[in-house]
Image (spheres, rainbow, N blue to C red):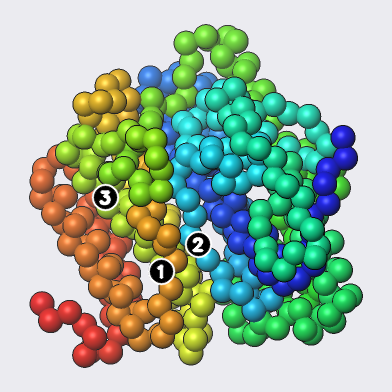
Amino acid sequence: MSEPSIVVANREHLWWLLTEASQLEHMILCQYLFAEFSLKDGVEDGLTVEQAEAVASWRKVLHDIAVEEMLHLALVANLMAAIGAAPTFGRPNFPTRSGYFPDGFRMELLPFGEQALRHFLYLERPEGMQEEDVRRFEPAAPIRDLLDPAELMPRGQQYSTIGHLYRGLEEGLRALSARLGERAVFVGSPQAQATPELFRWPQLIAVTDLDSALAAIEVIIEQGEGSRGDWRTAHYGRFLTIWQEYGELRRRDPDFDPARPTRATYLRQPFDLADPQPLLTDPAARRVAELATLSYELVLHFLTRFFTHTDENEEQLGLLIGGAIGLMAQVLGPLATALSALPAGPGSEGRTAGFAFEMYYAMSNFVPWREPSWALLYERMAVLVERCEDARRAGDAPEQVASAGQWAARFAGLLLPHVPPELLPTR
């Protein structure tokens, strides 16, 4: 069956599609991180030496793919900035099954295992490849109506794979540039671009014209589904290898389970979901989850400020990127991993707590001016330092909490010189 063409007849159509691409990349990234955080930790978690080696290898692959998804998110942000749009890191809460995305795209946080791997293979499948999602993700929403090119207002369009979406963006950029002229399409300032020098990602492409935009899209497609059908080293091929290795270990030991019984649990009912979600009830787990959620909010604030910066200098831009990456690696990741070993509490008996990547509002963390934005970053980082210390003093916190507090204090110290004294808290 031929796939419907994606329509890009004006800038707003393009803007809508790039925003949806950003949300998809963000949510896919979170799913991979959740699976990584759920993995058991060696023989201490009941694995044999052989199983522990396999799990360590899978953890690295999941982490590496998640890092590439972060790159994809940055590339989409560059594409948005290049056409004059403000990149956004807002998204709906998990799970999304209501047709928020096209039919066939379901987003849910699953611990590592058969269901998660089948879901990942489905998400990353190349165009034209038949792959079934897990049964819990069977289509539940109608197919989106085709967009008429004459429609001035944008709306969601139908695509069956991520590759299909990006091919549509590719063709849309070509068509729009041919009709309006490249300079009229790529109106964004080059200073708004994330560069490989700042991010230390050689594959990050600053988008300033049609050629660089197409090159950025090609990087996303090559890493995800593979270059024009060559998927062996792409995300799909790497997940397929894990699937085969996992199946072999399960065949030899049917009781082998590489993941903790993690369940995505929330501090409170998400504001944008009608169905009740499992809530964290264990006090120690709630304290750790609150710290992880606060650090996740700060990561998004750092990224938003970078991609919407105004008169920041090179040092400040580097600090924004270093803060986002450092928080992910040194605070959020360790806290979320520690959380997966804690009981979720009454109501989730037999399950451990899973970091739900909670969004508390249609979060953009966008503050238009530099000085108040940096003041808010410092203020929130100081709260994280204080709450880490409170959790540590409670006496039941995992060891990762003390380390998270030390790193947060370090980041706060780096932010402090860039905040005008009159904007600092008085206490």
User: Is mark 3 in CB contact (under 8 Å) with mark 1?
Assistant: no
- Amino acid type of the residue that numbered disc 2 sits on in the rendered structure: Phe
Q: How many marks?
A: 3
Earlier along the polypeptide chain: callout 3 or callout 1? 3
253, above or below 363, in the image? above
Residue 363 percent coordinates (x, y)? 42, 62
Does residue 108 appear in the picture of this structure?
A: yes
Q: Gap in Å between the C-alphas at discs 2 and 1? A: 9 Å
Which residue lies under the disc numbered 2? 89
Tell me the residue that label 1 is attached to: 365
User: Which x, y percent locates residue 426?
Assistant: 12, 81
Q: Residue at x 51, y 77 (%)?
A: 308
The local secondary structure at tag 3 comes to: helix
| Viewer-nearest of discs 2 and 3 | 2
Q: Quadrant of residue 86?
A: bottom right
Q: Is residue 47 left or right of residue 281?
A: right
Using the numbered discs, state the Cα–Cα distance from disc 2 to disc 3 in whole angstroms. 20 Å
Residue located beneath label 3 in the image: 290
Image vertical order of residue 133 relative to residue 364, above or below: above
Q: Distance between the residues labelled 3 and 1?
A: 18 Å
Disc 2 + disc 3, Cβ < 8 Å: no
Identify which amino acid the numbered label 3 is placed on. Glu
**In what element is the residue under mark 1?**
loop
Query: Dot 3: few (<14), some (14–19), or many (≥20) neighbours within 10 Å?
Result: many
Mark 2 or mark 3: whose residue is earlier in sequence: 2
Where disc 2 sits, the SS reads loop
Can residue 54 be seen here? The reply is no
Residue 71 screen position, x and y as percent: 61, 59
